[in-house]
Image (cartoon, rainbow, N blue to C red):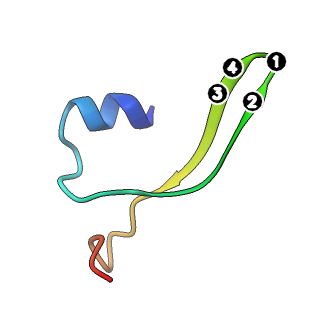
Amino acid sequence: MAWLLSALDIPDYPAEVHGYGTVIGTGNAVVEWDHENRGIK
């Protein structure tokens, strides 16, 4: 789902990747778009 949102440019601010790993040979990620901070740190 994250790659689809990125391809559509929705949302227009970067996400934070909390974790990535493989499960049964596939890539899985936990991704968050913080709507309150809008990617501003």
The residue where tag 1 is placed is 24
Look at the numbered disc 3 and give the secondary structure of its residue: strand
Q: In the image, what residue occupies the spot 20% across and 32% down?
A: 8
**Label 1 near label 4: C-beta < 8 Å?**
yes
Nearer to us in this view, 16 or 10: 16
Q: Residue furthest top?
A: 25
- Disc 3: CA contacts within 10 A as few (<14), some (14-19) or many (>=20): few
How much space separates mark 4 and mark 3, taking CA atoms? 4 Å
Q: Position of residue 2 (x, y in %)?
A: 42, 37
* Label 2 close to label 4 by CB (< 8 Å): yes
What kind of element bears circle 2? strand
- Secondary element under disc 4, as helix, strand or loop, is strand
Q: CA distance from mark 1 to mark 2?
A: 6 Å
Amino acid residing under circle 4: Thr
Task: Mark 1 and mark 3 in contact? Answer it, CB < 8 Å.
Answer: no
Alpha-carbon span between mark 2 and mark 3: 5 Å
Q: CA distance from mark 4 to mark 1?
A: 6 Å
Residue 19, position as x, y percentages in the image:
65, 52
Is there a contact, CB below 8 Å, between mark 4 and mark 3?
yes
Residue at the far right: name it: 24
Answer above or below: position of 37 versus 31: below
Quarter of the image with the C terminus in it: bottom left
In the picture of the structure, the residue carrying the numbered disc 3 is 27
Q: Residue 26 shows which numbered tag? A: 4
Q: Which residue is mark 2?
A: 22
For marks 2 and 3 on the same chain, the one whose residue lies earlier in the sequence: 2
For the residues bearing labels 2 and 3, Cβ distance under 8 angstroms: yes
Residue 27 occupies quadrant: top right
Dot 1 amino acid type: Ile
Mark 2, Cα crowd under 10 Å, few <14 / some 14-19 / many 20+, is few
* Placement of 29 over or under 12, stated as above or below: above
